[in-house]
Amino acid sequence: MGKKVANKMVANISEPGVAEHLAEHLWGLICQQTAVNCRPIILLCIGSDRYTGDALGPLVGSYLLERGPYSVYGSLEGPVHAGNLEETVRIIGMKYAHPLIVAIDACLGKTHEVGNIEAWEGGLEAGIAVGHRLPCVGDISIIGVVNIAGHYGFVELQTTPLSIVVKLSKVIGQAVVKVLGRLEAQDAAASLSGLAVK
């Protein structure tokens, strides 16, 4: 994990095929990680349902939990936010050996950036919009720009339309499910190949 930002992709939810585009980029980012076949993939979905704009991470987490037995931290029922992020990261570090953490969070940006999804290799710093100083988390990061940044981040997060957050969460969720399905298929093929050799 680190603050570096490399191989960054930016796409808007209004673009045709955005989920497929994001999935292909994520696949590339994951395949570039060291020892990817031996590392558990952890989906760290950061945010809170207390503010509409901050619910992106929990919405993605709940979407993923409904679709498979994935290792998800952060959902509508069990959010990971400023109050428990550090403890959650500590628990992940104790439970998994060398995990590959995909961090997902909401973000505020400029007017023309609203509706953008950004994905890159490297970590993200959650809570900046509302003045929190939290540790940088993630080997791969995905953010959705939910609203325009203002002087008081919590106001923008409170007044963000739910529709934009839901649209972003579905695109991100669909892309992550596609990638995880592809990884599962690859693992299954490798297992069958191993049995055939024996």
Image (cartoon, grey):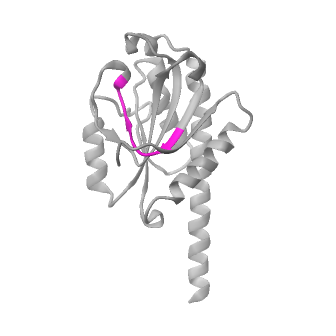
> Horizontal placement of 135 versus 185: left or right?
left
Residue 19 on the magenta span: no
For image coordinates 62% across by 85% down, the residue present is 196
Tally the numbered discs.
0
Image location of residue 73, percent across then percent down: 39, 42
Q: Quadrant of residue 195?
A: bottom right
- Give the side of residue 70 with respect to residue 137, left or right: right
Percent of width and height locating residue 138 = 39, 45
**Image-based side of 96 in relation to 187, left or right:** left
129 lies above or below 95: above
Of all residues, the one furthest to the bottom in this rendering is 198
Query: Is residue 126 on the magenta stretch?
Result: yes
Residue furthest right as drawn: 16
On screen, 121 above or below 38?
above
Q: Position of residue 159 (x, y in %)?
A: 48, 10
Up-down: is 191 above or below 152?
below
Q: Residue at x 60, y 66 (%)?
A: 186
Residue 95 screen position, x and y as percent: 30, 55
Could you tell me which quadrant the C terminus lies in? bottom right
Q: Which residues are magenta?
A: 119-128
